[in-house]
Amino acid sequence: MGSTTIQSRDAAASEIAPAETGSATHAVPASNGSAPASNGSANRGTQQPPPVGGHDVETLSVPAWLYRSHAASVLWLAVRLWLGYEWLNAGYQKIWGSEHSAFWFGNGVAVKGFATAGVLGSASGKSGASYGWWAGFLHNFVIPNASWIGKLVALGELLIGVALILGLLTGVAAFAGLLLNLTYMFSGSAGVNPMFAIASVFLILAWRNAGWIGLDRFIVGRERAQHHLGEISGRLTRRGVATVPG
């Protein structure tokens, strides 16, 4: 009886040992499989989020600094005030100043004379309109409608100046000024128009930043805030989806 009891214990031990060995063998792959997941979660935890706004101020290049940095808006303010004053003064002189009798109250006499000089100069080949099609436009459209075009030019120059000084729709105002400069230059008048045109081009390129010290701040700033909130919300959503176990 005693020997039978010993044999049954040995048999039980031999049955238990493979079971424990098997469970230990299967436990190793489970622990190995869970390691990459913990490493991945650790990597996600230590990953630094990109800065709000999509760029780091310290790494901005010169063009990016001019067009994005709020510090550069001081420079654009100086350009706006100078160019805006020039346009404002030009419009004022045509409506209330020394040129009002030739533009606002003179049936567009100045506009008619300016367009006529451009046509004649183009015909002689010495000055005036640079292209024949533009000379035809001056002759067939501008000269017959000089009266209301003179008022439109005077009022347009005044409004461009006001908008640039206030920083209201700076890009639109600069673009309107550029169109007038091109009109004058196409008709054979240089003067200050090339300088004004260059300044207008830079203001158009920097329209998001050029009016920051001005009324555009309340327009563009709201759009930037909404855009940044959308970016932050998207990042949080993506992180939440990434951390949820599949």
Image (tube, rainbow, N blue to C red):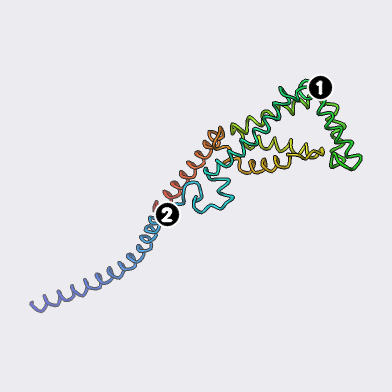
Q: Residue type at mark 1: give it.
A: Asn
The answer to whether 131 appears left or right of 192 in the picture is: right
Question: Where the N terminus falls, by quadrant?
Answer: bottom left
Task: Spot the residue most to the right.
Answer: 124
The answer to whether 3 appears left or right of 224 in the picture is: left
Q: Residue at x 12, y 77 (%)?
A: 6
Q: Residue 171: percent from the left, percent from the top?
A: 63, 38
Q: Nearer the viewer, mark 1 or mark 2?
A: 1
Foreground residue, 32 or 43?
43
Looking at the image, residue 29 lies above or below residue 122: below
Q: Residue 183: percent from the left, percent from the top?
A: 77, 37
The answer to whether 16 appears left or right of 213 in the picture is: left
Foreground residue, 87 or 140?
87
Q: Residues within 10 Å of mark 2 (few under 14, many from 20)?
A: few
Disc 1 element:
loop
Sequence-wise first label, 1 or 2: 2
Per the image, the residue denoted by label 1 is: 107
Q: Residue type at mark 2: give it.
A: Gln
Task: Spot the residue most to the bottom.
Answer: 3
Per the image, the residue denoted by label 2 is: 48
